[in-house]
Amino acid sequence: MGSGASHESATAALAAGVSEADIAAHLASLEKKPVTVFYNPGSSNSLSCAIMGSSIGCAELKVIQLTGEQKGPEFVAVNPYGQVPGMSDESNGLNLGESTAILRYLAQQYKPSLYPGSIAERARIEMAIAQFKEFVYEPWHLGKDSSNGYVGVSYCVLGDVMGIPMWPYPSDQPAANAGFVDALNKWAGLYLQGTFVCGDALTIADYCAVAILYVAVSPKVKEKTGFEAPERITKYVTDFLAAEPAAAELFGQAFTGLLY
């Protein structure tokens, strides 16, 4: 990879015979990182990008306050929809929004092992992310668009402890808890046959999922709702934290005293 402000992609560098360890050393040597990740600690989706950017060593992190700053001209220039996360890479002028797009880009540009090159592996990663968001995150964590009324288990607690009255508690908490457990068990049965989604190595799918599951397995969610995550999910989160020190640090900054 080049020096200064110009950085060819890590994918191209690997193809030219540069090792991923050499790329990591180059990034660590930079006084100014090429990428800025804009996030808010209360947003699990944006935390996934902050964790990965910090871990790779390519990114500076900037907190965006969700009290209007996300709609201001500086951030809207990065993500026109005014929602975290956002990402700016000054090495090529690219601005991005949407967590999955950012995770995919950071991996391919700076650490390709997080988004392995085989078509089959990438298809599995994409399917794991898509089905996690559709069948786990949106209905049971966030409680979005449910025909049976609000059934989210996690965000209601997060909103409660943060003083953001956007997500009510479910009218039938035991039923919501049971539905969330079923959704988690099905996803884990499909995708967690190894330590992580693609076996024993982390990929972008794990950053996407664990940023959300860390909230779901918290003591405060259990205290407020009675929800108990399946053991496989709790172990998955624990294994991710052991493999990814940046996650423990950023999760701690975001949720210690609130959920833990």
Image (cartoon, rainbow, N blue to C red):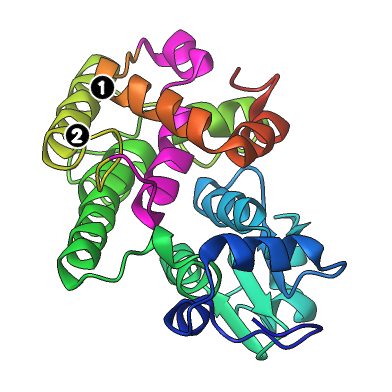
The amino acid pointed to by label 2 is Ala
Please tell me whether mark 2 sits on a helix, a strand or a loop.
helix
User: Residue 188 got which mark?
Assistant: 2
- Residue on which the image places disc 1: 232
The quadrant the N terminus occupies is bottom right
Q: Position of residue 146 (x, y in %)?
A: 23, 45
Residue 13 is situated, as x and y percent measured from the top left of the image, at 52, 81
Task: Say left or right for 221 vs 175.
Answer: right
Frontmost residue, 49 versus 224: 49
**Do tag 2 and tag 1 residues touch (Cβ < 8 Å)?**
yes
Q: Residue at x 41, y 50 (%)?
A: 208
Q: Quadrant of residue 142?
A: top left
Q: Give the side of residue 82 with respect to residue 141, left or right.
A: right
Q: Residue at x 72, y 33 (%)?
A: 253
Q: Which of pointers 2 and 1 lies earlier in the amino acid sequence?
A: 2
| Magenta-tinted stretch | 200-226
- Name the residue at 44% across, 23% down: 238
Along the viewing direction, whichever of 54 and 18 lies nearer the viewer: 18
